Amino acid sequence: VAVALDVQEGVVRDVRLALGAVAPVPWRAHRAEDALRGQPATEASFRLAAEAELAEARPRRDNGFKVRLMSNVITRSLSDLAGLGS
Amino acid sequence: VTVLTEPARRSTGVGRSRIEGPDKVTGRARYAFEHPLDDIAYASPVASTIAKGEIRSIAADTALGLPGVLAVITPDNAPRLAATEDAELALFQSRSVAYRGQLVAAVVATSLEVARDAAERMTIDYAAASHDVTLAPDHPGLYAPDYVNPRFETDTAVGDFDAGFSSAAVRVDQTYRTPAEHNNPMEPHATIAAWDGDQLTLIDSSQGPPRVKPTIARLFDLDPSQVRVVSEHVGGGFGSKGFARPNVVLAAMAARVVQRPVKCALTRQQMFSVVGHRCPSIQRVQLGADTDGQLIAIGHDVVEQSSTIKEFAEQTAVATRHMYAAPHRRTTHRLARLDVPTPSWMRAPGECPGMFALESAMDELAQACDLDPVELRVRNEPITDPETGQPFSSRNLVACLREGAARFGWERRDPRPGVRREGVCLVGTGVASSTYPARALPSSARVTVDDSGRFEVSIAAVDIGTGARTALLLIAAESLGVPTDAVEIRIGDSSLPDAMIAGGSMGTASWTWAVVNACRALRERIERDHGGTVPAGGLSAEVTTEADIAALPSSARYSFGAQFAEVRVDTDTGEVRVPRLLGVFAAGRIVNATTARSQLIGGMTMGLSMALHEESALDPEFGDFPNHDLASYHVAACADVMDVEAIWVDEEEPELGPIGAKGIGEIGIVGTAAAIANAAHHATGIRVRDLPLRLDRMLR
């Protein structure tokens, strides 16, 4: 996961989020980015944004775990960057 | 002129760095492929691209047209070999393909680059047949082999297992799986072959030059005296270099075809097909016990696989036969023959995968009995071998468990799983027992002393990176009663007195037996015949241990150990880390503390690697191992290993040779994976019964 996050006064002004190893190409998480802009920079919003991105994920037989893994890693990366700790 | 003093055990426990260390780190030590020879040619094999079928035709014109190509060897033109019963070595003697990656042709050229390029340009037309590469517990082809590796009984039964198990108050009945794994020594299998008339010299990366010699002699219809195999330095083998592999045959054949010396080194990718691997296993373990944890019944039923051309039946349930007491017992092995590469010896074959299953089941039983897992093992300690009734020559499993528990801080352990959280991680600890047979096989050694009082010890042993050369030096100096700098060790050459291979953790026991006896014989001659003074012209003594080993008492001889692991599991990612690993071993006399510790923590590191990383995935569609390189087959690296420590308890082994060294080559890997999996369960409450502990298995 690669993340760029711009938070001002506790609110997400802008965010860029890209995922690797989840699709045949590097995956730009536009849905999560759209869901986050203007939202409070909290772990709850990060988790919601991750879930929004992954709602339409279609895992294959052997990689279903990646949906939960990505949700966790997106939430953790955003939280770390926002200085929320873990 | 030397007057010898009485020998003392002054080398015992001394920590001595390996004597060839400076040569290795400065590059002076030569590995097989590095030996310079004039007029050398290079052989590059061509591997099959189907898993089953026949070669219809081979188009070699393009390859032959490349400048520098000397010859193409195929089933159409290959020299006939005098022996073909080992189909893995019967190179190019048939047009049948038994697995994907089997060697079907080769190119010989004046450079390695041209040889590889030409090999890739060989066009082979196959008539492919449908293949079966998938092992299943109910595979229709399962059968009971006549014996399991090397000559153990396939099945054993004591008492009435079914009745005993069903009557037990507490029962564990689980199935554990281990994947195919590959030995992956750092140095690939490599050979230089040079013919001088009908004399063949092989410089080979081998664990056993004396074993390669007769094999190659038979294939090429030579007397063994016409073959010399030299393996001065070997960069690991882990079982895969225990006998001649196709690279040796190819080098010898190619050298004969082109009438020049030939080098042949397998690529890492080729090593995943033609030099053996650990076969996957499906293991059902059933443990029945009283509520106080006293075992009543132990059952261990193994399903595994071999290739269609060679039977290798891993002795996976054999360790279960002597670990714990119980009146009702059963072990079985069933084998399916699939269209896969032939499995072989790898890092404690049998004990290593088998003890993952048994020691995981023991952890499950401890939990079911609400009993500490160390205490459970102590309660089931047998007095004599539980299947044969033989006495143990020495057995200190309980001492290892107790010592390890004390050092690890086990008594403060809260048994509840899944309750210790540190940040995003769950933390736990686990324990497992280790065991490995303590054996020796006949070997010979010669000790010579010259006028100046210099001793030379000669034995066809081999040092595959373990410190064997250094151990032999320490033992020889001790037995002769002279400083180590008065002794020269000559090993790694089949022309030296015949010896056991570096395998089965038997090297030190087998070789030191012969070396000590030769040293004693020489001392006796100096003292008895020459009044304690080396005569002019020097003196020599050569012995073999055949009679000594034939006279070994009928006892159960094993090393034992206990491994303790601390594990941290990241609950977001499922990643497993091992902050602490402690192994405590009872393996008879430890000859050299420095190299022994290195070997034991090396084994434990491989056990960690087995627990967390190593898995050769077999592609059911194409029948090969697609992760056939070190990028996608991860072997634990320094960053994976945090704190690993190995110690040993004092143990006197009275039977196994004059020094009582049981061997430490393999026990370090036995039980490690179970200790880590048990710790992961203690951390998370998740029981992983299929190795490795991939993050998808930890994310639930």
Image (cartoon, grey):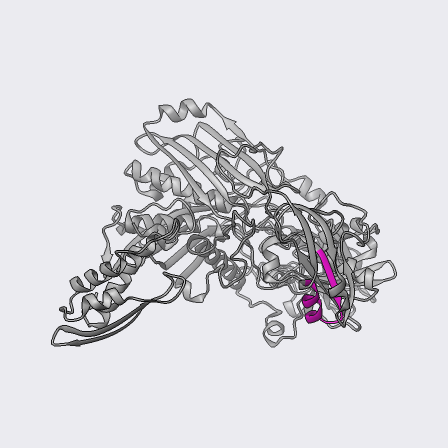
Q: Which of B17 and B88 is in front in this view?
A: B88
Q: Is residue B111 above or below residue B412?
A: below
Q: Give the range drawn in magenta.
A: B105-119
Q: Work out whether residue B318 or residue B376 is closer to the camera in this orientation and state it.
A: B318
Classify residue A4 by image quadrant: bottom left
Q: Position of residue B662 (x, y in %)?
A: 56, 49
In the image, B556: left or right of B547?
left
Question: Does B84 lie within the magenta span?
Answer: no
Quarter of the image where the N terminus of chain B is located: bottom right
| Front one among B206 and A18 | A18
Would residue B445 be seen by someone viewing this image from the given angle?
no
Q: Which residue is drawn at 52% across and 32% down?
A: B332
Q: Residue at x 55, y 50 (%)?
A: B622
Q: Where is residue B157 in the image (x, y as percent from the top left)?
A: 51, 27
Percent of width and height locating residue B164: 40, 24
Residue A32 pos. (x, y %):
24, 65
Q: In this view, does B347 lie above or below B368?
A: below
Relative to B477, B634 lies left or right: left
Q: Residue B628 is drawn in which quadrant?
A: bottom right
Residue drawn at x 57%, y 63% as measured from the top left: B186
Q: In this view, does B616 lie above or below B377?
A: below
